[in-house]
């Protein structure tokens, strides 16, 4: 439901990132109205990169993301792939040092559909352990790879009281690859409502305009009355 402008506050910004050889840095802006396991009412910007051939570009992009968040005084929730946490402690520690929140994005980023419950359990629990191993002590939410959930994964999440976070707005997939930063900002602001999750892919070299649009999206939503919080803060607001 869309509420009046004066009640548009408490969006969450969270990021889902493959730290070195993977693909995804997600930024999510969320609002505390009806935050549910199936589709939380939030705003999510997903940022993706393939760094097998572009490690230097990825590292610069990663630092740029942290810089943008700091300049805009926004704390984010980073959804991390377990194997990349183990391989890339420097990046993980930078996230912690900047006081962002960390979530679970599976261990291998393999689609978790038509899988056994043992596979699902191992993917989630191994990643939780990697997150704990780096010294992160706060609560951990979960983001399914590719947003896919079918039978076993929802059952496991429900049985273990694990919150799953997905999205509903995907501007850089809805628009053409050569869309300008201004076009991406405009699309996002027009299609976002309290509780929307915006997914973007800004870590590819071909998605530089998506990266350039992040500050505009944050500033635009703030002008509409939003205040950014992390996922755990949002859940606390919801009671």
Image: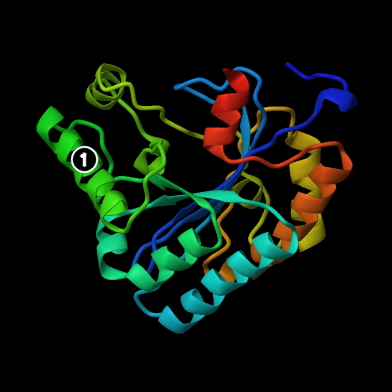
Task: Evaluate whether residue 109 shows in this view.
Answer: no
Picture coordinates of residue 76 (x, y %)? 58, 50
Nearest the viewer among 209 and 1 is 1
Picture coordinates of residue 24 (x, y %)? 45, 57
Question: Residue 197's quadrant in the figure?
Answer: top right
Q: Taking 42 as reference, is 24 left or right? A: left
Nearest the viewer among 184 and 235 is 235
Q: Taking 70 as reference, is 84 left or right? A: left
Mark 1 neighbour density, 10 Å: few (under 14) some (14–19) many (20 or more): some
**Kind of element beneath mark 1:** helix
Q: Is residue 159 above or below residue 66?
A: above
Task: Say which residue label 1 marks.
Answer: 125
Q: Taking 235 as reference, is 139 left or right? A: left
Query: Residue sitting at 46 percent across and 65 percent down?
Result: 49
Identify the image quadrant of the C terminus: top right
Query: Residue sitting at 27 percent across and 44 percent down?
Result: 128
Query: Residue sitting at 65 percent across and 25 percent down?
Result: 32
Picture coordinates of residue 16 (x, y %)? 47, 51
């Amino acid at each position: 439901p869309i509420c009046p402008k004066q009640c548009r506050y408490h969006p969450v910004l969270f990021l889902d990132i493959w730290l070195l050889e993977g693909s995804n840095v997600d930024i999510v802006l969320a609002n505390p109205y009806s935050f549910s396991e199936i589709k939380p009412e939030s705003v999510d910007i997903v940022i993706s990169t393939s760094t097998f051939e572009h490690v230097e570009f990825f590292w610069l992009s990663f630092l740029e993301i942290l810089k943008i968040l700091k300049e805009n005084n926004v704390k984010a929730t980073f959804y991390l792939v377990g194997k990349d946490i183990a391989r890339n402690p420097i990046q993980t520690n930078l996230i912690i040092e900047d006081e962002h929140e960390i979530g679970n994005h599976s261990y291998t980023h393999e689609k978790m559909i038509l899988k056994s419950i043992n596979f699902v359990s191992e993917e989630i629990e191994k990643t939780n352990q990697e997150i704990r191993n780096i010294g992160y002590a706060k609560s951990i939410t979960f983001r399914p790879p590719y947003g896919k959930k079918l039978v076993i994964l929802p059952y496991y999440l429900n049985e273990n009281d694990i919150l799953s976070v997905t999205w509903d707005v995907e501007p850089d997939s809805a628009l053409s690859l050569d869309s300008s930063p201004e076009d991406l900002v405009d699309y996002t602001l027009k299609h976002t409502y309290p509780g929307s999750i915006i997914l973007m892919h800004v870590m590819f070299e071909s998605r530089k305009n998506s990266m350039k649009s992040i500050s505009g999206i944050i500033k635009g939503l703030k002008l509409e009355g939003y205040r950014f919080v992390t996922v755990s803060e949002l859940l606390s607001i919801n009671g």
